Amino acid sequence: MRFSLEPHVTSPRPVMRLFLLVALAVATLAKKVDDSDCEVCKSVISSIDSMLTAADRKSPDAVEKVMQKYCNAAKLQDKKMCYYMGVGDAESGTAGGVKREISSSLTRGINAKRLCTRLKSKDAQMCELKYEKKIDPHTTNFAKLRVKELRKICDNEGIDTTGLVEKDEYIKKIKTHFNIKDEV
């Protein structure tokens, strides 16, 4: 056997191909963004943005008044988002201090998606809020849902659950509410 002291040199082509494949894979993974990522943030900021007039966009203080007006009427997840943004009300107060950053960004015309991405890097909870998934009562298989989920449907629809204990009782009450007939 002969040994060579010279370093082993390989062709640059396989190395380049490998490098290009890795770069392509990284680029593909980076583009896959969840549509529900920052959905509440995007929705709230888009709604506030749509309420702004040209005169409002001239000063952050005017934008903050519109933000306050929106947040006073907000409910559920939108209300929580207002709390995180720093636009609170008398009963809940505020948590964050990004109100001025949002208002000044809106005066400069920055869109909701870009603004929420920027806010996410400063405070991750801005993008953790999600809207509850809506159900279609005519296509949902209630037998596969848990009692907790059935109870939540009843609460959302205003169905009286007093005295209900068994899963079948909840299902029967929900089907009666939505006029769904059992298949025979």
Image (cartoon, rainbow, N blue to C red):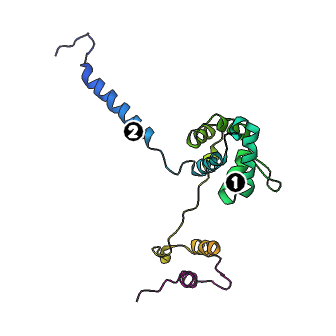
- At 52% from the left and 51% from the top, the residue drawn is 36
Q: Residue furthest left?
A: 1
Q: Which residue is mark 2?
A: 28
In this rendering, the count of numbered labels is 2
Q: Quadrant of the N terminus?
A: top left
Residue flagged by tag 2: what amino acid is it? Thr
Label 2 SS: helix
Q: Quarter of the image holding residue 30?
A: top left
Callout in the foreground (1, 2):
1
The residue furthest bottom is 184
Measuring 56% from the left and 42% from the top, which residue is drawn there? 113
Q: Which residues are magenta?
A: 158-184
Given residues 9 and 135, the one toward you in this image is 135
Question: What kind of residue is marked 1?
Answer: Lys
Q: How far across and how far down the image is residue 173, in percent?
A: 58, 84
Which residue is under mark 1?
80
Rendered image: mark on residue 67:
none
Depicted 96 relative to depicted 14: above or below: below
Q: Secondary structure at mark 1?
A: helix
| Residue 153 x, y percent position in the rendering | 59, 73
Mark 1 and mark 2 lie on one chain; the one further toward the N terminus is 2
Tell me the quarter of the image containing the C terminus. Answer: bottom left
- Residue 143 in the figure: left or right of residue 17: right
Percent coordinates x, y for residue 77 in the rendering: 65, 57
Residue 121 in the image, given as x and y percentages of width and height: 61, 37
In front: 91, or 9? 91
Residue 128 inside the magenta-drawn segment: no
Query: Position of 92 compared to 56: left or right?
Result: right
Distance, label 1 to label 2, CA atoms, is: 33 Å
Q: Residue at x 21, y 13 (%)?
A: 3
**Is residue 165 found inside the magenta-colored segment of the image?**
yes
User: In which quadrant of the rendered view does residue 86 lie?
Assistant: top right
